[in-house]
């Protein structure tokens, strides 16, 4: 009998638990109509997340494009820096060949001039331009004053001689011009 009394005692507890569960079910049924606004909120939240992800991806594409363009420009500038001693040597050879104009060296000088012209055209295609030289106003952003002199006949801060040509690509200086300046 003791077991039946214990069973009897357990049964009312189980019924109470079932009663509570029944109450919970009835409460959830009442909450279901209110769940629709929460699903709308969830939809808004998911839509906001989607829009943020799309905006982040657009920003990523834009940054990647800018990084690629900057890398390309930097690679071009590094290549030009490497080639500038060759350009300087070619200019020096051209000046030396013009100084001694004999019949034998005339054709050689013309060949050097054509090579220098081709190299200049290749630099132009890459967007590389020569920095202004003699007669221009001294600009510390693009010129490096190697010698500073006085001359009363010339205006102040004028470049009178270029020792080494400078080059730029767009607004960026690849190499500053080495110049002599007068005041």
Image (cartoon, helix red, strand yellow):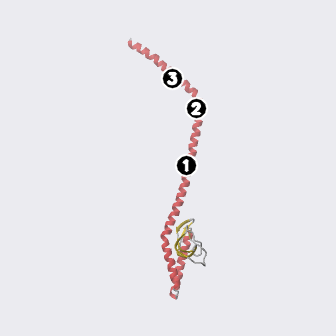
Where the N terminus falls, by quadrant?
Answer: top left
Residues at marks 1 and 2 touching, judged by CB atoms closer than 8 Å: no
Q: Residue at x 43, y 15 (%)?
A: 9
Secondary structure under the numbered disc 3 in the rendered image: helix
User: Considering depth in this image, is 44 or 74 the residue closer to the camera?
Assistant: 74
Give how far apart the Cα atoms at labels 1 and 2 are. Answer: 31 Å
Q: Residue at x 55, y 53 (%)?
A: 61
Mark sitting on residue 21:
3
Rendered position, 85 above or below 5 = below
Crowding near the residue tagged with mark 3, few <14, some 14–19, many ≥20 C-alpha atoms within 10 Å: few
Q: Would you name the residue on which mark 2 appears?
A: 35
User: Considering depth in this image, is 93 or 53 the residue closer to the camera?
Assistant: 93
Give how far apart the Cα atoms at labels 2 and 3 are. Answer: 20 Å
Instruction: Point out the tag, 2 or 3, that comes first from the N-terminus.
Output: 3
Mark sitting on residue 56:
1
User: Considering depth in this image, is 83 or 125 the residue closer to the camera?
Assistant: 83
Mark count: 3
Crowding near the residue tagged with mark 2, few <14, some 14–19, many ≥20 C-alpha atoms within 10 Å: few
Instruction: Point out the tag, 3 or 1, that comes first from the N-terminus.
Output: 3
Secondary structure under the numbered disc 2 in the rendered image: helix
Q: Position of residue 16 (x, y in %)?
A: 49, 19
User: Which label lies toward us, 1 or 2?
Assistant: 1
Residues at marks 2 and 3 touching, judged by CB atoms closer than 8 Å: no
Q: Position of residue 71 (x, y in %)?
A: 51, 61
Mark sitting on residue 16:
none
């Amino acid at each position: 009998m003791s077991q039946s009394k214990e069973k009897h005692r357990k049964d009312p507890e189980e019924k109470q638990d079932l009663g509570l569960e029944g109450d919970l079910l009835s409460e959830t049924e009442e909450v279901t109509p209110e769940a629709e606004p929460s699903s709308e909120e969830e939809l808004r939240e998911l839509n906001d997340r989607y829009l943020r992800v799309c905006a982040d991806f657009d920003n990523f594409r834009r940054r990647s494009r800018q990084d690629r363009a900057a890398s390309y420009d930097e690679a071009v500038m590094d290549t030009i820096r490497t080639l500038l001693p060759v350009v300087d040597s070619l200019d020096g050879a051209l000046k030396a060949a013009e100084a001694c104009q004999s019949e034998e060296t005339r054709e050689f000088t013309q060949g050097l001039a054509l090579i220098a012209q081709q190299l200049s055209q290749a630099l132009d295609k890459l967007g590389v331009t020569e920095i202004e030289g003699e007669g221009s106003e001294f600009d510390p952003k693009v010129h490096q004053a190697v010698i500073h002199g006085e001359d009363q006949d010339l205006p102040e801060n004028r470049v009178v001689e270029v020792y080494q040509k400078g080059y730029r690509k767009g607004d960026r200086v690849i190499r500053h011009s080495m110049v002599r300046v007068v005041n």
